[in-house]
Amino acid sequence: MPNEALPPVAQARLGQARQGGTWTSGLSVEEFAALRSVGFEPVGQVMGSTVYNLGLFYRSSANCGYVPAFFGGGATTTVTSSGPAWKGGFGAYIDTLYRARRTAMDRMAAECAALGGDGVVAVDLTIAPFQGAAHHLEFQAIGTAVRAAGPVRPGRVFLSHVGGQEFAKLIETGWVPVDLAIGASVGIRHDDWRTNRSARRFAPAQEIDGWTELLAVTRHDARTRLHADARRTGADGVVVSDIDLRVEERPCSASSQQHDHIVETTILGTAIAEFRVPHRPIRPLTIMRLT
């Protein structure tokens, strides 16, 4: 994204930063020292944001996987946002979330490039309701732009959720951040008579198979999307920072006086690549946490 495409207020803020000769950051003293120890220095705090209207998808009816039978009962399966559009899942909703997050991150990366930075560390991605507008969400990405002290420049601006100390550990062990990677999915399942019977207050201690399947299928779909997003960057693996899971119940649009359960899960991490060996085709993706 060229500098001219940034919002006017962002261009004005960047102009002041370049003229003032001073920089700001969201780093602690320890993070600042860790960055300097591996040859990087902060050049300024950068951000990107956008507000999206999710009204058509946020509370729309969706196929809950329930197929009624003529004499009661019926069959139920879990439907995820990766299913075909004709099945009526939440695919459009998830695609909108990806597009909104990417818009915010691209604007943050453009601010970094405008300040002469090589990448952004300690990125914080937030989603919050836009006050006074139903089904509108603000997507914001904010972090600290950094620049390498030496003459070698990366081919593009990198984005990373890791803080200063974790960034230094990656560099010292021969790894570099490439981009933020996201895996998100929404799954929906109708609460059929088997599920309702197992979930009753006075039912014996037992597994509720339908809800177990809903969670497992939705998590698997989110991990598959994370894998695909990381492969887009050409990275070797992902350092996962956060796994969010939300569960809600709502009336079923296909069967009156019955309910569905909806699970939304998001996995956020930093795609990383090894730089001390010649580039080779991507191997099976490794997902890990920094400790």
Image (spheres, helix red, strand yellow):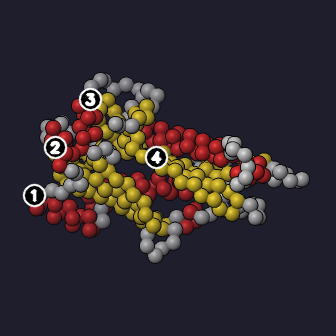
User: Quick check: 175 above or below 181?
Assistant: above
In terms of sequence position, does the residue under pointer 1 or pointer 2 come before the other?
A: 1
Q: Which residue is mark 3?
A: 173
Q: Which residue is the site of mark 1?
A: 21
Query: Looking at the image, do the residues carrying marks 1 and 3 touch, with CB atoms under 8 Å apart?
Result: no
Residue identifier under label 4: 243
Q: Is residue 145 above or below residue 284?
A: below
Say which amino acid is labelled 1: Gly
- Asked if residue 103 shows in the view, the reply is no
Which residue corresponds to mark 2?
33
Q: Secondary structure at mark 2?
A: helix
Mark 1, other Cα within 10 Å: few <14 / some 14–19 / many ≥20: few
User: Is 225 displayed left or right of 112 in the figure?
Assistant: right
Q: Give, as a three-letter code, the residue at label 3.
A: Thr
Going from the N terminus, do you reach mark 3 or mark 2 first?
2
The local crowd at label 2, few if under 14, some if 14 to 19, many if 20 or more residues have their Cα within 10 Å, is some
Residue at 50% across, 57% down? 96
Alpha carbons under labels 4 and 2: distance apart? 29 Å
Write down the quadrant of residue 209 in the picture: top right
Residues at marks 1 and 2, CA–CA distance in whole angstroms: 20 Å
For marks 1 and 4 on the same chain, the one whose residue lies earlier in the sequence = 1
